[in-house]
Amino acid sequence: MFLTFTARPSDSPFVERVWRSQSHAAGVFLSVATSHVEIAVTRHEGRTFLTVRGPETKVSSADCPAHGEWLAIPQQYLLSSPLSFGGINLSVGELAIGIVSLVMLASLQFMLHRTRTGIAIRAVSSNLVGAQFSGIDINRVVVAVFIVGSLLGAVAGMVVSLAYGNVQSYMGLTVVIKAFVAMVIGGLTSLPGAVIAGILIGVAESTAGIFLPSAWTEMVAYGMLLLTLLFLPQGLFTRRRA
C-alpha cells in the first residue's frame, strides 16, 4: 500500500485558491501550504513506514504500527495499583483520570472567562462578524482553539493510556462521539452544561445496562440526543440571547 499527499500551491493558482478557501481562518495552515510537502505511508513485509519529505529537509522515515493496531504500554509505566475508599474499589489510573479531568475543566473554564484569549474565543463563537469588527484577530483565535483542543486531547489520551495499558490510533473515537452528544444535549455554549450532560449519559447507560443487553446500552446516548433535538434543540443549559 502506498499513499502520498503533495501540496505545492505556489506552482498551481487553483490549488492555492482551494487551500485558502478551506483554511482562510488559520494562518498556520497557509504557512504550510507555501512549500512542497510530501507525506507517504508505505507497507512492506507486514511493517508500516511513514515518510516525510520537505523542500529543505531530508527524507525521514519511521516505523509505525499498522492501522488500528493496539500497542501495550510497558508495565512499569502503568497506573494500575488498586485503591479502596469506603468500599469503593478503583485503580490509581482511574483516580488520576477523575482528578486530571476536573483540573482541565476548571482550567478551561478559567481560560474562557478570565483571559483575553478565552474571551476572544467566546466572542468569535457567539458572533464572528461582530468579533471581526471589534478588532479580534480571527486567525489567532482559530490557532488558539486548535492548540487548546490538541493539548487537552493529548493529556486525556496519555492519562487513559497509562490507566488501561493500551494505546491505539482510534482509541478516542467513541469518547469524542459521546462528548459531541453531551455537548449538544448540554448546550453548545455551556461548558458546565456539557459536563452535566456527560454525567447524565453515563448514569443512563449504566442504568440501562441493568435492563438491556450490553449491545443496546450504546444507543441510550443517541436516544437522549434525539429527544433533546426534538424538544430542546438549543440544549438543556443554553443561555437564551436577548
Image (tube, helix red, strand yellow):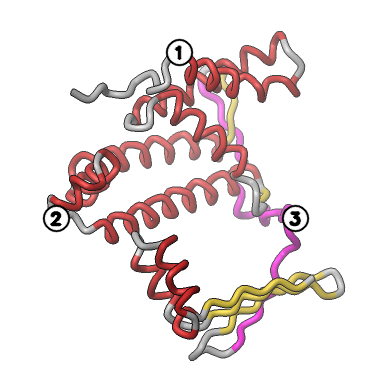
Mark 2 or 3, which is nearer the eye? 2
Q: Position of residue 181 (x, y in %)?
A: 51, 29
Q: Amino acid at mark 3?
A: Glu
Label 2: element kind: loop
CA distance separating discs 2 and 3: 47 Å
Label 1: element kind: helix
Name the residue at 18% across, 23% down: 242
Name the residue at 48% across, 18% down: 228
Q: Amino acid at mark 1?
A: Phe
Q: Position of residue 80 (x, y in %)?
A: 62, 41
Q: Pointer 2: residues within 10 angstroms few (<14), some, or many (20+)? A: few
Question: Mark 2 near mark 3, Cβ–Cβ under 8 Å?
Answer: no
Q: What segment carries the magenta color?
A: 59-85
On whether residue 8 falls in the magenta region, the answer is: no
Mark 3 or mark 1: which comes first in sequence? 3
State whether residue 138 is above or below residue 131: below
CA distance separating discs 3 and 1: 41 Å
Mark 2 or mark 3: which comes first in sequence? 3
The residue that mark 3 highlights is 69
Taking depth in this image into account, of 137 and 213 the one nearest to the observer is: 137
Q: Position of residue 120 (x, y in %)?
A: 21, 48
Name the residue at 38% across, 23% down: 234
Label 3: element kind: loop
Q: Pointer 3: residues within 10 angstroms few (<14), some, or many (20+)? A: few
State whether residue 34 is above or below residue 216: below
Check residue 231 in the rendering and tell me which mark sits there, or answer none.
1
State whether residue 152 is above or below residue 14: above
Q: Pointer 1: residues within 10 angstroms few (<14), some, or many (20+)? A: few
The residue that mark 2 highlights is 135
Q: How many marks?
A: 3
